[in-house]
Amino acid sequence: MGLPLLFDTYKPIAGTFDEMIDAEGTPRAHALRATKILDGLTPKEFAQAQSLAELSLYSQGVTFSVYSDQRGTEKIFPICLVPRVISGAEWNRVEKGLAQRIAALCAFLDDIYGPQKILTSGTVPADLILGAKFYLPKVRGIRPPGGVRIPIAGIDLIRSPDGVFRVLEDNLRTPSGVSYVVENRLVTKRIFQSAIEESSVRPVEQYPMHLAETLRAISPVDPAETRMVLLTPGSFNSAYFEHTFLARTMGVELVEPSDLFVDDDTVFVRTIRGPERVHVIYRRIDDAYLDPEFFLPDSLLGVPGLMRAYAAGTVALANAPGNGVADDKAVYPFVPDMIRYYLGEEAILAQVDTYVCTRPDDLKYVLENLSRLVVKAVDEAGGYGMLMGPQASAAEIEEFRKRIIAEPRRYIAQHRVELSTCPTWVPGAEKLAPRRVDLRPFILTQPSGSWVLPGGLTRVALVEGSYVVNSSQGGGSKDTWVQKDKSL
Amino acid sequence: MDRAESTARLLQVTRTLVFDADIPVTQCWKPLVIVAGVEEKFIERFGQDNIGNGELVQSYMTWEPENPVSLRTSVRAARESARVLRDVLSLESWEEVNELYHWLGGDEAQVLYRQNREQFYRRVRKSTQLVLGLVRSTMLHDTPMSLLWAGAMLERVGQTARILDMHPHTMTLESAHQIVEVALWLSLLRACSGYEAFMKKVQGRVSAQAVASFLVFDRRFPRSLRYCLLSAKQILLHIWPEADRPGPGHAPYARLDALTTWLDKQEATSNPSLIHALLTRVVDDSALICSDIGREILGPPQPEKAAPVPTASQTQSQSQTQSPSLEAVPLEGRRPPKADKPEQTGKAEVQ
């Protein structure tokens, strides 16, 4: 049997791991079924399916808005219908690694906002932590109601040429993108009908139920009596679609800060029949805009008194304020040490070697090798504040050199990882070509343990040769198929 | 349901949609521009002579982005409101609004508009009617839907009243056209989707008096002023079961109750020459009722945003016109609030 029609001309990039096709050009064992689904489709037929999918997302308004565009243009997050498939056995290992990592990061945050033993032990440099932009000294000593500081996490993984999944960064504040995982699956299902069932793909639609359960589990009152709300900055926010999606699918109220008020250290939501008490807030608002009393006295945004209620233990916040100190990119290199320190285990998931510019040796190396390195600002996300050395102009490199020397604490550097690729539809050329991908799994954690959404958001750099997968920078997405593990 | 601002927008969506469904495709272009409340803007832009220019009027009322009540603007506004209320609307209602919006912005709609105008209007009307149907058949019958429906009813009052009030204009300003009175009344009935219902009622005996009385007083025609007002009253009792006593919901209820009582009295002393005055009162009071509802949900308007006099289309507290006359009513208030404007809002119940 030959390759499916679509894969006739497909060649992985030399020196790069391809998720679906091996170096000899044959489908990997776990991807065989998925490639067969596309078997028999001509490029023309595939193009039709592709435009159907896009139309469907468009009609449903599955969009995000782009900040750089002042008019708030909405775009769909482009989807490529060729799925990214992960074998059941491999996923089991990833799941364990993610749960382990979250356990260590939770312990780290409890420690940092408590006794700070890890700093006195010298495992992590104290000045690095206490000087982090998102470290909140005022939160120290507050026990979060429910006891879990990271109920919702998104951890970005990449796969290096040796086929190893590595953590690229942690998102422990308000990770987004999960709505696209669920919507992508709905669209793929509609178009490939029974194919997904045949390939024994693990479902993702249950995410909102798990999220609701996780939020109820950290409630300060009986879960059955718990009133939860989702707090959004408003309809102008780029992730507003996701906020409405989660509110709808969990069946909880979507509120803006002005819908909430605090009386006697208790949070209430205004309703048409009078105020009602709120016990859990899934907030999709940054720390700084939660409570003007606590954070920014001049700000009109936020819910005055919210942090008092939080400290009094009457309301749970997901995620806890102050988490930013743990997903700081300069703290990331120390996560394996945290796992060792708190759990007494070796990290299951590998990382990417990182140069921390506050270390004199690292700084020297970085400045000497800027054209070969990827430099990132530690406190920025979304692909902003980044230098891709190998692709940058001399002027850009000099600009970054100045910035790094001025503020070494703000920068880290890594060698560019040859991100793995996945066969991706190229409109115009009407064929499949290798494009680079990453993976953002979502981890929900309650006191009894973590649950990992099977798969997560596969983002793909649609532009040939690009390594940047962010939706704000021309990235697209793919449905991620985790196969059922037959060995279980 | 919803954030206060949301409620305002919700009413707005509905109003816009009801309006769209009622666009009369008649040959009397000038009244169309007048009834839409854009006469002044139109003349300023195209001159007095062009107000009878059917193609120009149609294109102005369909595509013009600067016309706040053009189909495209209305649908865009409705869609933006629906997007903000996405957590409240059912998936089906939202998809229909969104698809109409994208269709209207695409080539397909342009082609249909050029090649088959009638089909084009039908498509738009069907979509808008479908949205209203979907709202009733797919949303939880709870406070959010009640608010939406109360808004639809009160907006319909305004629409029917404005259409009915086209008559004096046509007669006084366009008398040179010598339009046969009966034909005119029938076209008004069609504009309110009331032609067949009316005929069933009067069995062919058409008169100005009969049409006016049908559109104002009929208890069973779902677009008559009385029907809409009585429906709105019932809905308010759903939202606030004790609205007939002082307390939550009482202000809009009491005003509505007074209006329907007054309307009953007018029926007894029906006088066609007073119709304009009657319509003006009904529209103005409906507007006040809308703002009463808004105040019940949002609390008193913020001082810097408060408008002194509410108008027919008021559901949000920014951007209204203050004109008491029927013709000028619909304009500014139709414009939806800016999406990026942070609103101070209360929160209504969401199940």
Image (spheres, rainbow, N blue to C red):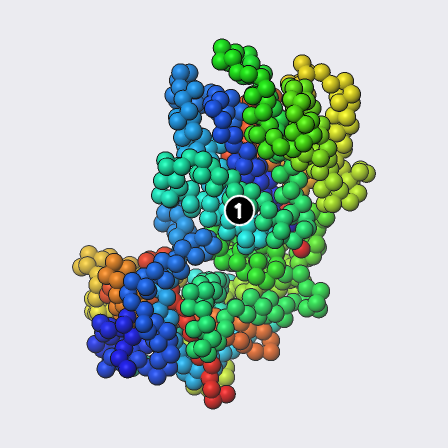
**Looking at the picture, which amino acid does disc 1 mark?**
Ala
What is the residue that sits farthest to the right in this orientation? Answer: B245
Q: What residue is shown at x 49% (from left), y 26% (from top)?
A: B26
Residue tagged 1: B82
Of the pair A326 and A62, the residue shown nearer to us: A62
From the top left corner, tell me how far across and down residue B233 is, in percent. 73, 37
Left/right of residue B132 with respect to residue A159 in the rendered view? right
Q: Secondary structure at mark 1?
A: helix
Q: Is residue A109 above or below residue B106?
A: below
- Regarding residue B203, the answer to whether it shows in the image is yes
What is the residue that sits farthest to the bottom in this orientation? Answer: A487
Q: What residue is shown at x 72% (from left), y 48% (from top)?
A: A273
User: Which quadrant holds residue B279?
Assistant: top right
From the top left corner, tell me how far across and down residue B82 is, in percent. 53, 46
Q: What residue is shown at x 57% (from left), y 53% (from top)?
A: B90
Of the pair B187 and B39, the residue shown nearer to us: B187
Q: What residue is shown at x 26% (from left), y 68% (from top)?
A: A433
